[in-house]
Amino acid sequence: MKYENMPTAQFIKESNNGNINYNDFYRKFFEKLKEADKKYNLLITQNTKKPTITKGKITALPLSVKDCICTRNIKTTAGSKILENYIPPFDATAIKKLKEQGGVIVGKTAQDEFGHGTFSTNCAYKIPKNPLDPKRSCGGSSGGAGGLVAALNMPHIAIAESTGGSISAPAAFTGTVGITPTYGRVSRYGLIDYANSLDKIGAMGKTVEDAALALNIMSGHDPMDETSINEKVPDFLTATKKDIKGMKLGVPKEYFSEKIDDKIKNIIWDKIKHLETLGATYEKCSLPTTKYTIPSYYIIAMCETSTNLAKFCGMRYGAAEDLKGRDFNEYFSDIRGKYLGEEAKRRIILGTYARMAGYRDQYYLKAMKVRTLIINDYKKAFKKYDCLVSPTMPFIAPKFKDIEKLTPVENYFADILTAGPNLAGIPMISVPAGTHQSMPVGMHILAGHMQEEKILQIAGATH
Ligand code: GLN
């Protein structure tokens, strides 16, 4: 049987009908996985153990998992040296559900340390290279996930995470599909926190159907996560096939500003016109708070990460050493100084400052108030429109040599189109919309809370 380019649905069907020789399939799969990893630096840990096959909705389907998501008996570092030797004794709820349905964990994908980044260049291990042009970034922070989906022509879905755009960015840069669900739709139990009020587990695949399939399985209430939402999970796969006639699209003018590459804007407009021929209508609209999204996102994300990472002190979690006569403060700063990367340190320092007595009102509390205004902007828009559409990223995947020249603040501005929806906790999907300079361009589709079906409906129609 030829597995190359086999659609996931067909693989699962053949698998459930007993038509797949798993030894044969996995020998080939692991060969390709190793080759892709060697060429493009995509995995922190490979798991090429012979899989035990469980029957279910995704029988024997290979899954890669971003390294900030806990996998039982497989090293989970969140991309940090401070967790270099951490082997979780449990699976994150999302992973447990996928395994129960037959999913096979084939490896842990490379990422920015703790998810701190947009280009997967803030890495303590490997820096993933874009399989479409290895001089360019895969995007981040789920860079290994996006790169692996792009590099493998075998059945495979990548499980990833987004705090401020880490699924959308790599999807756009690698020409893949990335879905980030509503905050709380998928349990965060077993996800190593970056910024807990923002973190979401989602999925990346070659097709909209692959993203929907993974979401179908991972979604649902989990008593182990108090922020998980207790609502019925619809069938997301059905949504991908629904007619879009009569759907109303909003096109926010701020998402087509002069900061976005003109060629990219044209490609997205062509897609919008195409959706119009399929029966959707569109209207230009405005999200006036857009200019505040980057400052408020980064203040909130850094404040939260500075508290979430406090537990990695050399005593309670992660890397540890002998005290050797050092007092506790000396010891904690030695360990954190040695095992945390530059960007993690920058964010811990800035986040600690922004929530200090005296500065709290000026920074953290103000950012939280602005967040409410941003949420209200989207709420207002979704009273009128089913979905909002825009480019996913302001430019195509940048070259590493150009990323090096960016200051941290310039770096953060790459998230101008993704920080807003992530702050609001609304669902989003990035789908390939065309190419510019032979590199993929992603279209971003957003909808109101718990309206994943709508983004999947539009995404399905763009294919
Ligand atoms: N680029 C954003 C940041 O650095 C988003 C990262 C993420 O979603 N994990 O915070």
Image (cartoon, helix red, strand yellow):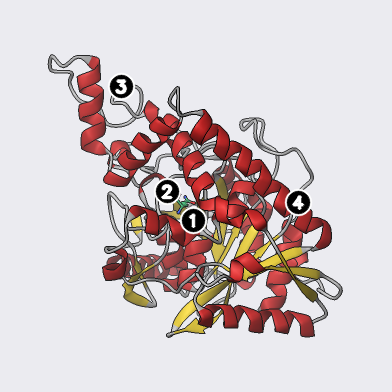
**Element at label 1:** loop
Q: Earlier in the sequence, mark 2 or mark 3?
A: 2
Q: Looking at this view, name the residue that lies furthest to the left.
A: 324
Q: Which residue is mark 1?
A: 166
Q: Is residue 81 above or below residue 54?
A: above
Quarter of the view holding residue 145:
bottom left
Residues at marks 4 and 2, CA–CA distance in whole angstroms: 27 Å
Q: Position of residue 130 (x, y in %)?
A: 37, 71
Taking the image as drawn, is residue 102 in sight?
no
- At 61% from the left edge and 78% from the top edge, which residue is drawn? 268
Kind of residue indicated by mark 1: Ser
For label 3, count other residues whose C-alpha is less than 10 Å away and answer few (under 14), some (14-19) or many (20+): some
Respond yes or no on whether mark 1 lies under 8 Å from ligand 1.
yes
Taking the spot 38% from the left edge, 65% from the top edge, the residue there is 30
Mark closest to the chain's N terminus, 4 or 1: 1
Secondary element at image label 4: helix
Q: Which residue is mark 2?
A: 115
Cβ of mark 2 under 8 A from ligand 1: yes
